[in-house]
Amino acid sequence: MRLAPRSRAFRLFPARTLQAGLCLLGLGLLTPGCESLEQATSCEAGIAANADALTGSVDALVAVSGQMKADLAVACTALTTDLGGTPAPIANPAAPTDDEVTAACTAASAALRAEISAAGAIQFTVAGGRCSLNAQAQFSCESKCAVNGACDPGTVEARCTPGELSVQCDGVCSAGASCQGSASVKANCQGTCSATCEGQCSGSFRGSCAGSCDGQCDGQAVSGATCAGTCEGTCTGGTATGSCAGECQGTCTGECQLAANTQVTCGAEATCKGSCEGTASAPRCEGKLDPPSCELDANCEAACDGRGKFEAECSPPTIEVQAGGSARLTSTLQANLPKVLAVLSRGRLAVDAATSVASSATTVAADITGSAGCLARYGLDFAADLKAAGAASASVSVSVRASADVSASSSSQP
């Protein structure tokens, strides 16, 4: 969704702003405090770097805030409608207000709780779905922050929070790490699988069993029997496909936390998160990048950190339903809950950065006001940036709360 450019409203500024404007127009060159056009238009390099970085970050914050609200409005309205409820009215679904998003998701949460109460508990697993920082956007921003020399931003591998780096690994993923798959990519697994395990399950199991089922088959007690339906208990002697509470030996459509003293080749399209012994490529960071080795102004650094998080690359999860008494509940959860969870994941990454960027923008706005040249160069536009940053930061928090409420309602018990 493309967002319309933010309007740049005119505001009243101190008298020195008018003086700088007169200098720019060549109307005040002989007045005190305006000795030359160069003086009127000169802005300190440090303030200019901070202002430029924050302008880019605020634009990214406004964009992601609007996208989160639009995605939630669509998903929450669909959930409510599919479950027979009355959706909250939204004047423009492509650009809903904070209040409209809150109302839409409150209605969806109520519809979910009512359906689950009537139909009985539903069991499902969330497969895949994760957000990775846009490290290149952050690095590009940081390279422009250093005003006294170039800043080498380093590499994703060197700066990613330990344990949050994932790579394409041409080798083995080591013990303590994890192989990451998705609904469309099966990762090789010898450990605990967060989604669907296909192979052998050494612990409590629920799903289809091509071997011997001990426990219940479609709700009937069985011992060592072939189960053509849903096996709950243990599955031995054949391929198990489903949820495994013990160790999975086979493949996993989510994240497989490797067992101790285990080394696994994750698979051609799966990624290794943690430790790769071999050639690593396509690094992605799911956590926080440590600061670069060069010293940057704190406000510029906060702007660049926010830029990487606001422009994060996120993939939605898929919902795999194991049991449920309502076909329409199963259908709408599979179609719409991944969108809600994707917003929640993106929002959690962005919420702290949004607050930091809004705070830094306030600080830099004061610096701009204190410089006639910077005020002439940035004043009107940066005032609009400051207002936009505060509003977008608040909207991100609204979206996080709304998506968290819907997620909690979908997993509630009757």
Image (cartoon, helix red, strand yellow):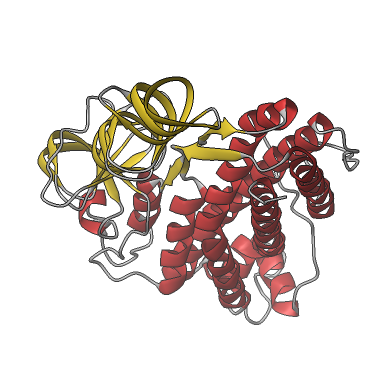
Return the residue found at the far bottom.
32
Residue 52 visible in image: no
Query: In this rendering, would 373 be left or right of 403?
Result: left
Q: Position of residue 279 (x, y in %)?
A: 11, 36
Q: Quadrant of residue 36?
A: bottom right
Residue pictured at 30% horizontal, 64% vertical = 290
Please name whichever residue, 4 or 213, is drawn nearer the observer in this view of the structure: 213
Q: Quadrant of residue 49?
A: bottom left
Residue pictured at 55% horizontal, 32% vertical = 219
- All told, the count of numbered labels is 0
Please name whichever residue, 27 or 209, is drawn nearer the observer in this view of the structure: 209
Query: In this rendering, would 179 be left or right of 43?
Result: left
Q: Position of residue 8 (x, y in %)?
A: 74, 53
Quadrant housing the N terminus: top right
Query: In this rendering, would 9 be left or right of 59?
Result: right
Residue pictured at 60% horizontal, 50% vertical = 59
Residue 130 visible in image: yes
Look at the picture and state if 73 lies above or below 393.
above
Q: Position of residue 406 (x, y in %)?
A: 69, 49
Residue pictured at 76% horizontal, 73% vertical = 13
Please name whichever residue, 11 or 3, is drawn nearer the observer in this view of the structure: 3
Q: Position of residue 263 (x, y in %)?
A: 12, 41
